[in-house]
Image (cartoon, rainbow, N blue to C red):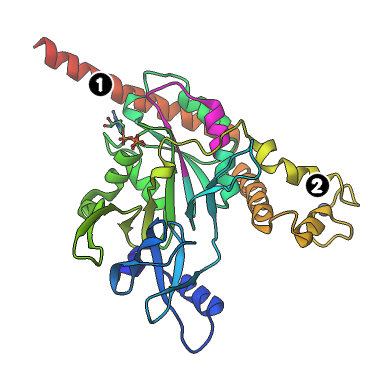
């Protein structure tokens, strides 16, 4: 597997490049590992290189590189995670990452649940166009706050919930199994939630590939830059940008109604009450998209959320989820109690 494939390049991406950059000189595809004010680190067929002139690129982008080495542009983003300033509509949103397939909303089990935070992060995840998944971390500590697992499952409203412990290496296979070849997982969660530990645990033997990369900066000096995309092997990738760490995605209260409220408001203006916002005449959603008042990307995100939630609800009914949460919780608690007991035994010996 070449460097580019390790960073998620697939036949599908190859096809998208031919489609979006037709012509005799097909550009070289490259994935942005890190973007820093126009200076970007990319994975290419020739390994990992620095490029200049990538002002518009963000981590995760698929960049098109001319034979001369300059950046021509990038593929349309399949998802876009951004930080919004709800109170100031004029300020530009800060883009945290692009082309994320799976957004892990990390909830640590070593502290009480912040339901507001969980719900707002889930909405931001849906808004990005990626598929959210809730990842409970530090399962080995889950006795401390008894109701976090059940409450998280309840608040996640059908979004899949996985439980992990980097410490005990629990749940890692499950999570790894969710990230297919060519897919990118990003983790969102508060500081100290265990994101780095989880990434390192997922990496296992690949660990030496990550973290710092030493690269010449063209002037003979060497700089050390942290990679923000981390290959897990087999074309699965984890995105780990500073912007995603301990950093709120919003500056004001915003939940479903704030992020998608403008879209839901449009429904009332459709000619038909039961408008499916597809091809119906007089559809306010379609006309907002056509006039540019509604970004098509956001509408697709909204649709994706509806679709995924409906199918998740079909797949796993609430009762089954509660059973799962209870039985998991018992196992986790027993394991933690056993560990506590072992520690105490050691101290008193
Ligand atoms: N018991 C236990 N501790 C854990 C686990 N995962 C992480 N920790 C501890 O939790 C603390 C924070 O973990 P990090 O992985 O640094 O958390 P982070 O989310 O990357 O934090 P930021 O870098 O601040 O965003 C560290 O002291 C870890 O050792 C776990 O599964 N079990
Ligand atoms: Zn409509």
Residue 21 lies, in percent from the top left, at 53, 79
For residue 111, above or below residue 298: above
For residue 179, above or below residue 123: below
At 29% across and 19% down in the image, what residue appears? 337
Distance between the alpha carbons at the discs numbered 1 and 2:
55 Å
**Of 69 and 105, which appears nearest the observer?**
69
Among numbered discs 1 and 2, the one appearing first in the sequence: 2
At 47% across and 20% down in the image, what residue appears? 147
The CB of the residue at mark 2 lies under 8 Å from ligand 2: yes
At 28% across and 70% down in the image, what residue appears? 47
- Magenta residues (range): 104-121
Say whether residue 114 is magenta: yes
For residue 53, above or below residue 207: below
Give the quadrant of residue 122: top right
Q: Which residue in the rendered view is the most extreme toward the bottom?
A: 24
**Residue identified by numbered label 1:** 338
Say whether residue 37 is magenta: no
Question: Do the residues bearing badges 1 and 2 touch, measured as CB atoms within 8 Å?
Answer: no
**Residue identified by numbered label 2:** 266
């Amino acid at each position: 597997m070449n460097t580019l494939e390790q960073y998620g390049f697939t036949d599908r991406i190859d096809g998208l490049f031919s489609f979006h950059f037709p012509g005799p000189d097909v550009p070289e595809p490259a994935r942005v590992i890190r973007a820093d004010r126009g200076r970007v680190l990319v994975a290419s067929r020739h390994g990992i290189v620095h490029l200049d002139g990538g002002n518009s690129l963000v981590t995760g982008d698929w960049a098109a590189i001319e034979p001369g080495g300059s950046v021509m542009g990038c593929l349309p983003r399949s998802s876009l995670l951004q930080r919004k300033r709800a109170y100031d509509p004029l300020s530009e949103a800060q883009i945290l990452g692009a082309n994320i397939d799976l957004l892990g909303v990390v909830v640590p089990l070593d502290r009480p649940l912040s339901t507001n935070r969980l719900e707002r992060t889930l909405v931001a995840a849906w808004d990005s166009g990626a598929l959210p998944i809730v990842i409970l971390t530090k399962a080995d500590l889950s006795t401390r706050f008894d109701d976090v697992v059940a409450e998280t499952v309840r608040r996640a409203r059908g979004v899949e919930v996985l439980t992990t412990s980097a410490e005990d290496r629990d749940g890692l296979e499950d999570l790894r199994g969710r990230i297919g070849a060519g897919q990118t997982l990003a983790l969102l969660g508060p500081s100290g939630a265990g994101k780095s530990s989880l990434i390192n645990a997922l990496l296992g033997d690949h660990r030496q590939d990550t973290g710092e990369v030493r690269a010449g900066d063209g002037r003979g000096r060497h700089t050390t830059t942290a990679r923000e995309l981390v290959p897990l092997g087999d074309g699965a990738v984890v995105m780990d940008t500073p912007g995603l760490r301990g950093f709120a995605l919003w500056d004001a209260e915003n939940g479903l109604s704030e992020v998608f409220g403008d879209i839901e408001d449009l429904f009332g203006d459709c000619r038909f009450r039961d408008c499916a916002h597809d091809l119906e005449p007089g559809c306010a959603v379609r006309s907002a998209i056509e006039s540019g008042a509604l970004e098509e990307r956001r509408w697709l995100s909204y649709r994706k959320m509806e679709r995924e939630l409906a199918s998740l609800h079909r797949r796993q009914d609430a009762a089954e989820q509660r059973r799962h949460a209870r039985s998991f919780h018992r196992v986790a608690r027993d394991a933690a109690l056993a560990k506590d007991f072992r520690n105490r035994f050691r101290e008193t010996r």
